[in-house]
Amino acid sequence: EKKRGPRMHPELLELYEVTDRVLGVGTFATVKEIKLKSTGKSYALKIILKKTLQGKGAMLDTEISVLSKVRHPNCVSLLELFETEDAVYLVTDLAQGGELFEQLLEKGFYTESDAARLVYEILLGVEYLHNMDVVHRDLKPENLLFKDKSENATLMITDFGLSKILTNNNDVLMTACGTPGYVAPEVLEQIGHGKPVDIWSVGVIAYTLLCGYTPFWGEDQPALFESIIAAQYEYEEEYWNDISALAKSFIDSLLVRTAERRPTATQALSHPWFRAMLEQDMVTP
Ligand code: ADP
Ligand code: MG
């Protein structure tokens, strides 16, 4: 018999066929494709081993009750939950189009109007989550998934809410690949993790989509942290020459050192960069 890790929840196995297709492996979870037997429709199954919860299992329940209410086109919905002694199984919408991270690697960078559309969608999701008092804390291209493989596929935020429980402060600093390039200064200084941390990350994402590299950089982790905490970044001529002043002013408005001075998601959505890009799209199809 094949080894499948922990024994799955019996009811889950009754309702769903668990395929061998692994959709992704994150910091805490393995995600597999599953099929609802009654309809044949595919979903994603996120498996979190309880040993990674480190005694914070009780927090999981409160958090999940919030997450199960999240219904927004730019957020991956939690549809069902199963629990065994060893693991928690979350059934969510399936995002067929893969990670923004992968697409960015493929493309190198995005045109301004494509980047603006993607950032706008991320902000719509963030605005919704913040209105529900959910702070993501780990927004980055690996946690942004395309709904399908089409050209203009909707972008969906995943992996939110649980970071509060699953991450202790040291983990934030050592997420996958050891590149916490999207994390806000106040998270590194361990003095804050409110809604503005997500706004900062959106700023880093916007910068990265437009040029193909992250704004903060260092030879090693301490150097990277220093660069983030100083909140100093540049628009290198070679890569930023053709990018509009509005795009830069948008990024500058988010990558502000003092958390309280950053715009809310709603305010960020009304930045003139988005309107300018939309109008441009309408003239040049
Ligand atoms: P972790 O908390 O461990 O980081 P994630 O929720 O980010 O877990 O999932 C890890 C990876 O699995 C994601 O980066 C993505 O590639 C894939 N994945 C997660 N959720 C889905 C989904 N709903 N549809 C398709 N792929 C997904
Ligand atoms: Mg993740």
Image (spheres, grey):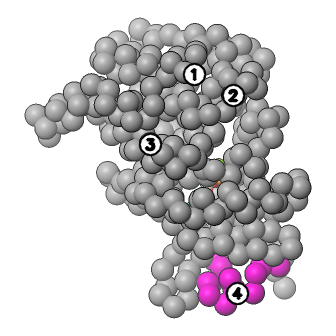
- Disc 1 vs disc 2: Cβ atoms closer than 8 Å? yes
Q: Earlier in the sequence, mark 2 or mark 4?
A: 4
Q: Secondary structure at mark 3?
A: helix
Would residue 87 be found to the left or right of residue 213 on screen? right
* Residue, disc 3: 127
Inter-mark Cα distance, 2 to 3: 19 Å
Q: Quadrant of residue 13?
A: bottom right
Q: Earlier in the sequence, mark 1 or mark 2?
A: 2
* Residue, disc 1: 259
Q: Earlier in the sequence, mark 1 or mark 3?
A: 3
Inter-mark Cα distance, 4 to 3: 35 Å
Q: Quadrant of ligand 1?
A: bottom right
Residue range of the region highlighted in magenta in the rendering? 7-19
Image coords of residue 212 (percent x, y): 48, 28
* Residue, disc 2: 192
Image coords of residue 51 (percent x, y): 88, 59
Q: Amino acid at mark 2?
A: Gly
Q: Secondary structure at mark 4?
A: helix
Identify the mark at residue 11; answer none if there is no mark.
Answer: 4
Q: Earlier in the sequence, mark 2 or mark 3?
A: 3
Residue 219 or residue 171, whichever sits in front: 171
Would residue 258 be found to the left or right of residue 188 on screen? left
Residue 158 among magenta residues:
no
Q: Quadrant of residue 5?
A: bottom right
Inter-mark Cα distance, 1 to 3: 16 Å
Question: Dot 4: few (<14), some (14–19), or many (≥20) neighbours within 10 Å?
Answer: few
Q: Quadrant of residue 265?
A: top left
Q: Say whether residue 122 is visible.
A: no
Q: Is residue 113 above or below residue 81?
A: above
Identify the mark at residue 138; answer none if there is no mark.
Answer: none
Question: Dot 2: few (<14), some (14–19), or many (≥20) neighbours within 10 Å?
Answer: some
Tell me what residue is drawn at x 84 percent, y 85 percent. 1
